[in-house]
Amino acid sequence: MTQVVVPLSNPEPRFLIERSQAARQAGADLVEVRLDLCLQEGASLSAVLEAIPALALPAIVTLRHAHERGAWDGDEAERLAIYERADAAGAAWIDRELVFHAARPWRPKRAKLILSYHDFTGPGVDLPGKIAAMRACHADLAKVAVMPLDASDLDAVRRLHDGQEAVAAMAMGEHGLPSRLLAGVWGSALVFARLPGDAGSAPGQPTTADLLEMCRLRQQSPATAVYGVIGSPIAHSLSPLIHNLAFAHHGLDAVYVPFRVEDAPGFWTACGGWIQGLSITIPHKHALQVQMDDLEPLCDLVGAMNTIYRRAGGTVGTNTDADAIRRCGERAVGPLPGRRALVLGAGGAGRAAVFALRAAGAEVAIANRTQARADELAREVGCRAVAWDSLAAERFDLLVNMTSVGLKAPADTPWPHAFPSGAGVFDSVYNPLRTRLIHEAEAAGCRAVVGLDMFIDQAVAQFRHWTGLEAPAEAMRAACLARLSA
Ligand code: NAP
């Protein structure tokens, strides 16, 4: 079973004890006392060692040297003397770097020994060889932590667990986060997680809540199906929140994680084999089509793919944005045939909107800040392009914002003009939930539809592709609202 470790680095023993209690309450199994960080914060060594028996969870004691990206700078003889004191004080585990252990072997008398290998700047060298060396040194647990250059490096970390016991291999940073969130699927012996509000002891540590509640670590096993979203950036994505909620709602043995990916084809080549389904967001919606066994016709037509699912062993690419946009348009103005729709934006989402609204029978006009993109899309689809600086005179029944204007910028709007009376407005931006465009449209008497509706709709359709089941849309919406208003 994967044990959850919360790192502690408080300067005062009473805070160490309090945080260890909070760690136990959060569901952790162990704490890691980062002696080097405690000492850096001004702790007394003796006081910290004396606190070890009073901690609410068994402790890993680690004294990481400055050469190992730690904060301690004594010599190795002094470090061993401190480790001996920690062992005598009741540490459950002592964590030592392999390279120092190999040069000067040492074993605690009572505690178990973790041997570690870290690479904070790259994906590491000969990782299986490092684990074999740790075994040869009789480590009770072999730990590897590396910095992936991209998410494709995750696969090498995953494979370190194959057929091995007592191995904890992890990738650091945002690119490495899935290695931690999938620790139970990969069979890692340990996973480090921080208490909400804490900084953690290494880049990319998830919170105990994300690991234990959102990703249900305790239910994970090698049989758990892995899903995720790829994008860059990806930390802001609400998709893990809602898809994990939907998997839990149906009691499915599946987990969904955020993959920060720069090179999407490289990632899919390396990791696609163990991923059941994928959501795809900016900037990768055009990147993976050629790697699919099949593409749904709509995806081919729109030229953007936001979903991968599997059918009879093959991978299929599709686009669930387009149908979600159509539904949002209908919510704003009712049946679309014959209605005049003005789409702002000719990026990936704008393309999906133009195709979806055209296919639903609307009369579509397209405007884009960069005129050439609007002209090209209009030519391709056979609709009208409108110049960005003559938009004020444009008449429409439905205004659809598919630009990123307003995203995390509540003062910005893509439509600083008057609204025709009785028009409907759909803003695809959902952070903030209610944009300036939505506020002004409602104030002008328009029926306004928020981007969260599209986000939930496209996710529900993805979930249907993956599981054949209906996702709990209202619970997903409530979870997003809570997160967005937090
Ligand atoms: P994209 O391909 O990067 O396109 C961005 C679009 O925004 C382009 O048309 C761009 O115009 C325009 N734009 C950016 N800054 C602008 C500015 N200052 N003034 C005017 N236009 C500007 O991104 P995308 O995939 O199409 O996504 C666009 C937006 O749709 C996202 O930001 C997101 O808010 C929304 N979206 C929502 C959902 C949902 O589920 N609700 C799903 C997908 C997307 P240029 O061509 O001139 O650069």
Image (spheres, grey):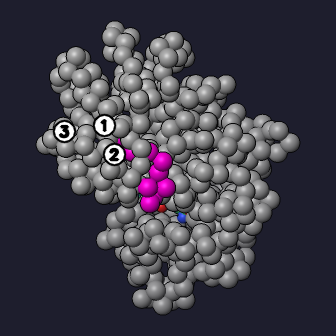
Decide: is 378 above or below 329. Answer: above
Q: Residue furthest top?
A: 103
State whether residue 184 is above or below residue 336: above
Q: Say whether mark 3 is within 8 Å of ligand 1.
A: no
Q: Would you name the residue on which mark 2 appears?
A: 53
Q: Which residues are magenta?
A: 24-32
- 350 on left or right of 289: left
From the top left corner, tell me how far across and down residue 473 is, in percent. 65, 71
| First-in-chain label (2 vs 3) | 3
Q: Which residue is mark 3?
A: 46
Q: Position of residue 433 (x, y in %)?
A: 45, 72
**Image point (21%, 32%), residue name:** 71
Residues at marks 2 and 1 touching, judged by CB atoms closer than 8 Å:
yes
What distance separates the C-alpha of mark 2 from that of mark 3? 13 Å
Rounded to the nearest angstrom, the CA distance separating label 2 from label 1 is 7 Å
**Label 3, residues with CA under 10 Å away: few <14, some 14-19, many ≥20:** few
For the point 47% across and 33% down, the residue is 171
Q: Which mark is residue 412?
A: none
Mark 1, secondary structure of its residue? helix
Element at label 3:
helix
- Which image quadrant is residue 409 in? bottom left
Residue beneath the point at 40% across and 82% down:
440
Residue corresponding to mark 1: 89
Using the image as rendered, state which of residue 359 and residue 178 is in the foreground. 178
Q: Position of residue 323 (x, y in %)?
A: 69, 64
> Which amino acid does the dot numbered 1 rest on?
Ala
- Front position in the image: 479 or 394: 479
Earlier in the chain: of badge 3 and badge 1, it is 3
The residue type indicated by label 3 comes to Ser
Give yes or no for residue 28 being in the magenta stretch. Answer: yes
- Residue occupying the point 38% across, 29% down: 95
